[in-house]
Amino acid sequence: MTQDEVLAVFREAGAILEGHFILSSGLRSPVFLQKARVFMYPEKTERLCKALARKIEAAGLGKIDAVVSPALGGLIPGYETARHLGVPAMWVEREGGEFRLRRFEMEKGARVVIVEDIVTTGLSSRETVEALRAIGADVLAVACLIDRSAGEADTTVPLVSLTQYKVPAYEPDKLPPELAALPAVKPGSRNLA
């Protein structure tokens, strides 16, 4: 899929929002990709994740034993991408503030691809890589539907994205005046009380 095709799916679902948003990373942006609006449509989700699975296969990573995603945002795309790869889907979740593979067992040396929804800074990806390496997994790559960083995110392993979509993101104390004038909204799920 091309960038235009991926973004068209997001637009069809009303998932490209404009305003002043606080991202999961803490950065601020005038654009928010509300992937939950895409994931509520199984046919749209399947189309994106099937294309992501084909892109993962084309990356030449070799045999993949499992897909692991960070909860909560990565659950749906991780499951659907794993389905198209023909491998189990698992997830890490926070326990004591750190990601853990709590509900599943994994053999040492298992060849794993981490599937995310959207990558901005790579923080969730890095934390997932650390959690999996701590139990002896061989993390081959991180894959995502959209790389908001346009290749700048540090995931510590290769990043395979369905598309790149560079969206401005700012530190809270370095906002352009037009963004600072708008009320900030936090539509994501990280750090909800």
Image: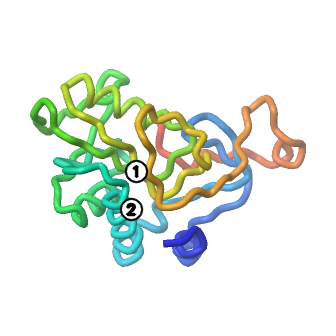
Give yes or no for contact between labels 2 and 1 (Cβ–Cβ under 8 Å): yes
Is the residue 42 above or below the residue 169 in the image? below
SS for callout 1:
strand
Residue type highlighted by circle 1: Ala
Relative image position of residue 161 (x, y in whole percent): 47, 55
Q: Residues within 10 Å of mark 1 (few under 14, many from 20)?
A: many
Which residue lies under the disc numbered 1? 143
Instruction: Kindly give the residue lying farthest to the right in the view shown.
Output: 177
Picture quadrant where residue 184 is located: top right
Which residue lies under the disc numbered 2? 55
**Closer to the camera in the image, 134 or 71:** 134
Picture quadrant where residue 44 is located: bottom left
Q: Is residue 192 shown left or right of residue 133?
A: right
Q: Is residue 128 shown left or right of residue 153?
A: left
Scheme by which the image is coloured: rainbow
Residue at 36% from the left image edge and 46% from the top image edge:
72
Residue at 38% from the left image edge and 62% from the top image edge:
55
User: Upstream in the sequence, badge 2 or badge 1?
Assistant: 2
> How far is disc 2 from disc 1 in space, using C-alphas?
9 Å
Q: For marks 2 and 1, give the one nearer the viewer.
A: 2
Is the residue 113 above or below the residue 36 in the image? above
Relative image position of residue 23 (x, y in whole percent): 60, 42
Relative image position of residue 185 (x, y in whole percent): 66, 47
Residue type highlighted by circle 2: Lys
Is the residue 83 above or below the residue 9 in the image? above
Relative image position of residue 81 (x, y in whole percent): 30, 61
SS for callout 2:
helix
Residue at 39% from the left image edge and 44% from the top image edge:
142
